């Protein structure tokens, strides 16, 4: 840990401790890298009742995994194994059904395929069956012409991107993640889609505080929400804790430590112990706005790059209930946070911590 940042690390540690002591959070991890070096690695609270969280505790983190999925694609593109303009049907012929033949991998990364929806009766058992889910999605009728608009592909994102990778390369996303990203970065046991049986005992148990009312509100007020998240597979603690979901590859969600996420994003920005995942030129491309406009699911304007959410100065992904992972290219900074209490309406304390870290680093650099 860099002594120059010990004060900031102490403030983050105190804040996390207060959140846990007050009952606002149960278990939390916060990690940050600056120019490829770890500067914050804070953890507090319980992974399970009576079992303390540790640096390598694995937190089910829902859509934060979409940034991991995108990273796998960019690493493969860097090696020439994939191209963003690849027509999905050229490697996955079944996907051409119902006018989807011109859908590209780039459309999938930007939530623009027109297939954000699932059959109403989709169940957790379906989620655990990769081939069934891919068949359902391949046979789906798009809600709009691919590439003409965007709409959050809460679940389908992972199977569309994942099956395209599998058909094009002969390797699953999980295998590429292990071989090309997690392994070289030394976090092979902390960065997963499906969690191997051997490390299931390190997975934190999710709980909720105000999350079910939030989901009910979204269902009642967003006309397309239930099409995208059918009732039996809403992103809640009950689903996230199911052993068959934890073990399955569902690349729209994932399970990891905060330090593994921060390290992965750091290796997108530059070298981490000699490992750099993509070139500076590709970094500029994948962090640039690729889709901007109203979202079909949420109604409000959203800016997306090739697989990440984009805001002024940073890109990344966040997940239901509070996890997050972001990179700030101009600062050389990455921040990740995980938690196991899925909450809503509490002021997003982990986002506030992210803002604290970003602000103090920017001030120190004179930005």
Image (tube, rainbow, N blue to C red):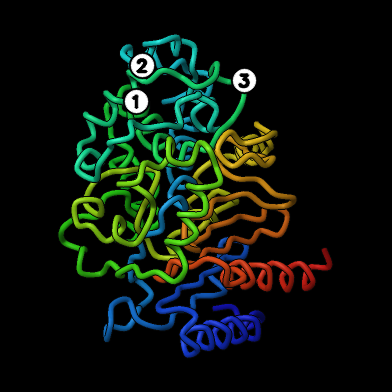
- Residue 274 appears left or right of 4: left
Q: Identify the residue under disc 3.
A: 148
Label 2 residue SS: helix
Identify which residue, 22 or 270, lies in the foreground: 22
- Residue 281 appears left or right of 140: right
> Residue 311's spot in the image, x, y percent?
70, 49
Label 1 residue SS: helix
Identify which residue, 4 or 149, lies in the foreground: 149
Q: Are marks 3 and 1 in contact (CB under 8 Å)?
A: no
Q: Identify the residue under disc 2.
A: 95
- The correct choice, above or below, for 194 with respect to 227 in the image is below
Q: Identify the residue under disc 1.
A: 137
Q: Quadrant of the N terminus?
A: bottom right
Identify which residue, 346 or 25, lies in the foreground: 346
Q: What residue is shown at x 36% (from left), y 29% (from top)? A: 165
> Residue 260's spot in the image, x, y percent?
42, 61
Q: Quadrant of the C terminus?
A: bottom right
> Residue 90's spot in the image, x, y percent?
39, 11
Q: Are marks 2 and 3 in contact (CB under 8 Å)?
A: no
């Amino acid at each position: 840990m860099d002594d120059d940042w010990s004060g900031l690390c102490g403030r983050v540690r105190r804040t996390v401790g207060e959140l846990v002591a007050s009952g606002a959070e149960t278990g939390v991890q916060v990690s940050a890298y600056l120019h490829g070096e770890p500067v914050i690695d804070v953890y507090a609270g319980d992974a399970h009742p009576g079992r303390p969280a540790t640096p390598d505790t694995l937190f089910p983190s829902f859509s934060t995994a979409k940034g991991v999925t995108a990273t796998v694609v960019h690493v493969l593109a860097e090696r020439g194994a994939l191209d963003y303009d690849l027509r999905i049907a050229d490697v996955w012929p079944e996907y051409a059904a119902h006018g989807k033949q011109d859908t590209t991998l780039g459309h999938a990364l930007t939530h623009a395929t027109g297939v954000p929806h699932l059959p109403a009766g989709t169940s957790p058992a379906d989620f655990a069956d990769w081939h069934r889910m891919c068949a359902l999605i391949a046979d789906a009728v798009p809600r709009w012409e691919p590439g003409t608009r965007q709409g959050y592909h809460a679940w389908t994102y992972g199977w569309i991107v994942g099956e395209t990778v599998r058909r094009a390369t002969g390797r699953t996303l999980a295998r590429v993640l292990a071989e090309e990203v997690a392994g070289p970065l030394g976090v092979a046991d902390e960065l997963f889609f499906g969690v191997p049986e051997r490390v299931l005992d390190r997975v934190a148990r999710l709980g909720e505080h105000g999350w079910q009312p939030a989901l009910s509100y979204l269902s009642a007020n967003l006309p397309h929400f239930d099409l995208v998240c059918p009732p039996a597979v809403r992103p809640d603690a009950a689903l996230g804790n199911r052993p068959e979901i934890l073990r399955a590859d569902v690349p729209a969600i994932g399970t990891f430590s905060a330090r593994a996420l921060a390290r992965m994003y750091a290796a997108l920005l530059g070298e981490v112990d000699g490992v750099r995942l993509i070139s500076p030129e590709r970094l500029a491309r994948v962090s640039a706005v690729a889709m901007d406009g109203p979202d079909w699911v949420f109604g409000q304007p959203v800016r997306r790059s090739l697989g990440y959410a984009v805001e002024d100065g940073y890109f990344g992904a966040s997940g239901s209930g509070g996890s997050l992972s972001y990179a700030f290219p101009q600062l050389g900074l990455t921040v990740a946070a995980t938690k196991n209490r899925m909450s809503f309406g509490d002021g997003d304390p982990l986002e506030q911590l992210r803002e604290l870290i970003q602000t103090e680093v920017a001030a120190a650099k004179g930005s």
